[in-house]
Image (cartoon, rainbow, N blue to C red):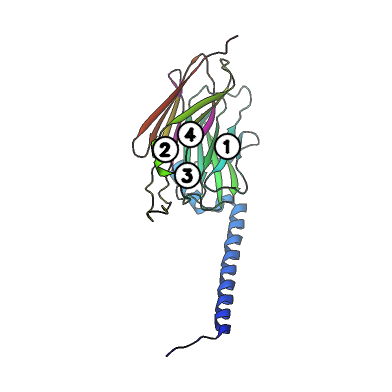
Amino acid sequence: MHITLPNRGLKGLAQRTATVLAALFFTTAQAQLKNADNPEASPNWQKVKASLFKGRSIAAAPAGMLELEAPQRAADAAVVPVAMRTHLAAGDSRYFKRLTLVIDSNPSVVAAVFDFAPGNGNAEIETRVRIDEYTHVRAIAELSDGQLFMSTRYVKASGGCSAPAGKDPAEALANLGKMRLRVDGELRPGQPLLAQVMINHPNHSGMALNQLTRQFTPAHFVRQVNVSYAGKLVMTAELDFSISENPNLRFRFVPRAPGELKVEVLDSQERRFESTLVLAPAAS
């Protein structure tokens, strides 16, 4: 027996479905806006706070001490620019020991931890991250005296962790680990210098579906970056797949004399790469 459903039934079902979806969207939007206004309400942040900082007090950063730069709405959730900048008043004997970058709603909540050696001035990091859904992004700074300060931004972006790689897999593999290392400006001993390292690496999150094989590409990402100058440590970075494809780090350091800037990289498959750049004063 063939039964034909009346059109009005199908239309009614579609209308009811649209109503339910609209209600869900409205409820989700309300929850997101509520969370945007209350950073401490994030359950993921509370877990990270308890695990990483063991109940230590984290104060809101005073104006000018710790700045977190991130777009309110990202143009591309897979490549979201963020910057953490710090400043201490002249004469303050402390230094910024660590910067931690937290993305509350990402599968990997702790995106990066940067440790700095003393004597390198105010800590500063610029990079690019993946963001999986609307979320608070946090910069937590630890000073050499153990005090913790935090700055927070709410970023509207979604789908960054499952976005497909932007480059051909064969090309990415052929260029794996190649680096470009540069500095902006001339070496002036005792003066801060801005450096940048660009690492060719797919930084697979393990969440992106290969459109040809219909399989998830296994996670493979830069896990650690060590930076030294003239044989002395400048900075170490512990990274996760929340960092975008082809990791890009900009940072400041204070060279005391001519020397070699060296970057060593270790990825999640224990592959090691390095790059060096010799710095010397400009010819007069």
Q: Residue furthest right?
A: 63
Q: Earlier in the sequence, mark 1 or mark 3?
A: 1
Q: Is residue 234 magenta?
A: yes
Residue 21, by quadrant, is: bottom right
Marks 1 and 3 sit apart, C-alpha to C-alpha, by: 15 Å
Q: Which mark is residue 242?
A: 3
The image shows residue 183 at horizontal and vertical percentages of 54, 24
Task: Please give the name of the residue rendered at 58% of the width and 18% of the height, measured from the top-left corner.
Answer: 186
Q: Are marks 2 and 3 in contact (CB under 8 Å)?
A: no
Question: Could you tell me if residue 64 is visible in this image?
Answer: yes
Q: Local crowd at mark 1 within 10 Å, few (<14), some, or many (≥20)?
A: some
Q: Are marks 1 and 4 in contact (CB under 8 Å)?
A: no
> Looking at the image, which residue is at 61% across and 44% down?
71
Quadrant location of the N terminus?
bottom left
Label placed on residue 83: 1
Where disc 2 sits, the SS reads strand
Structural distance between the alpha carbons of marks 2 and 1: 19 Å
State the mark number for residue 149: none
Q: Position of residue 59 (x, y in %)?
A: 58, 40
Residue underneath mark 4: 114
Give coordinates of residue 223: x percent, y percent. Answer: 41, 37
* Span of residues in magenta: 228-251
Residue 204 relative to residue 126: left or right: left
SS for callout 1: strand
The residue labelled by disc 2 is: 222
Q: Residue at x 58, y 79 (%)?
A: 11
For marks 2 and 1 on the same chain, the one whose residue lies earlier in the sequence: 1
- Mark 4: few/some/many CA within 10 Å (<14, 14-19, 20+): many
- The earlier-in-sequence mark between 1 and 4 is 1
Q: Amino acid at mark 3?
A: Ser
- Which one is nearer the viewer's eye here, 66 or 69? 69
